[in-house]
Amino acid sequence: MKTIKAGLVGITGYAGMELARLLAGHPQMRLVMACSRAESGKRLGQFYPFLEGLPGSDVVISVFEAAEAARCCDVVFLAVPAGTAMEMAHDLLHAGVKVVDFSADFRLRDAATYEEWYKGTHSQRALLSQAVYGLPEIYAAEAARASLIANPGCYPSSVILGLYAALRHRLIQTDGIVVDAKSGTSGAGRKAAVPTLFCEVADTFRAYGLPGHRHTPEIEQELSLLAGQELRVSFNPHLVPMNRGILSTIYTKLADPAMTLDQVHDIFCQTWQDSPWVRVLPKGALPETRFVRGSMFCDIGLVVDSRTGRLTILAAIDNLCRGASGQALANANLMCGLPVQTGLEHLAPLA
Ligand SMILES: NC(=O)c1ccc[n+]([C@@H]2O[C@H](COP(=O)([O-])OP(=O)(O)OC[C@H]3O[C@@H](n4cnc5c(N)ncnc54)[C@H](OP(=O)(O)O)[C@@H]3O)[C@@H](O)[C@H]2O)c1
């Protein structure tokens, strides 16, 4: 059994930490390189005591160098901010290393849209056409042939999976979709910032980034492809005083207001019957973030209100696992010829 050697840039961030956790339990992938500028020189087991004694704990944190990565890695995960990943990805691909990028640098197929929403120049436009948007339920075949994965955003993962069955089977009107999404504070990353200090997030509840959060064009891009027409959504994120988890409540209008919950539920169940990570809950049950914590599951609940003609879809994921590192690992599995679920069969720890 060949061991796949993995590098991780951004080891000190929340997404990097979650990937280090997942890689420590992976049967065929080993962390051989871990990069951070601020913590370089520290042994990983010293920096992350939860890793002590496990595979990867003896890796010494280093500053990223593409040549060194090319020497020792088969695949490199870029868990760094948008705008910093694109050059790294270019150098790694040039050296023949597969890349999974966590940032938004390769998610938007149109460079002008990226530059408009991310307020920076896209220096690697030529790579956009070879990047695969890594939502395994939709793009697994493309991911298996890819060298560059654009790992989806956390909110978009919940919204796209939530709406997929409804759009594919034309159950809903394509205009007027409203997404009311809530995330735990790890979604904002680990860097010190006043808006995410304990006293600023505990015991309060607020919306942010309205209108025009950066995940909007990514959601619209993928939903438009699904619907086969240009589609606009109103995307409204909120910050919840919890560490992890996303719950997206998606308000839609049924195309046929006479449709029943039984009919909608049957179609959702059929759509996802071969996708073990997408769980359509029994009729009447609504998802909770604690039941998907630390896992790849996307739990979907359905509400049909015949009085208003609305279908409300609720989708819960873990932002760090399904919304970032678990999904990145699933994509790396596909790229490296492993079964997609390898090392990812966790259930949520409860209480
Ligand atoms: N948090 C989530 O829920 C989530 C979900 C989906 C996607 N993502 C994406 O995943 C990426 C990482 O997010 P995060 O939440 O883990 O962020 P984070 O906690 O702020 O960590 C960022 C990491 O990147 C490194 N870094 C920052 N600037 C860098 C630069 N210019 N060059 C090289 N390394 C740099 C940092 O280490 P040093 O500064 O020491 O180098 C740190 O390890 C982002 O693109 C984010 O959008 C995050």
Image (cartoon, helix red, strand yellow):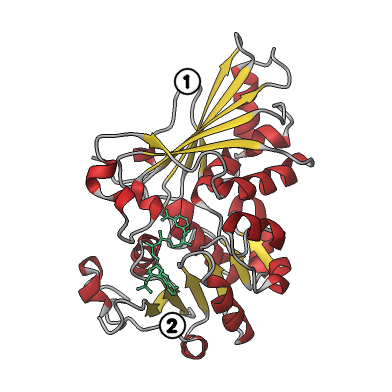
Residue 345 seen in the current view: no
Q: Left or right of 89: which side holds 53?
A: left
Secondary structure beneath dot 2 equals: loop
Q: Position of residue 343 (x, y in %)?
A: 43, 62
Element type at mark 1: loop
Q: Is residue 280 visible?
A: yes
Can you identify the residue that label 1 sits on? 284
Q: Is mark 2 within 8 Å of ligand 1?
A: yes
Q: Badge 2, how many Cα within 10 Å: few under 14, some, many 20+?
A: some
Of 148 and 41, the residue lying toward us: 41
- Disc assigned to residue 64: 2
Q: Could you tell me residue 344's position as x and y percent?
A: 43, 57
Quadrant placement of the C terminus: top left
Residue 103 or 317: which is nearer the viewer? Answer: 103
Q: Amino acid at mark 2?
A: Phe
Compared across the picture, whether 25 is left or right of 300 comes to left
Q: Amino acid at mark 1?
A: Gly
Q: Position of residue 102 (x, y in %)?
A: 51, 63
Residue 48 numbered tag: none
Q: Quadrant of ligand 1?
A: bottom left
C-alpha separation, residue under disc 2 versus residue under disc 1: 49 Å
The single residue placed furthest to the right in the displayed view is 228
Mark in front: 2 vs 1: 2
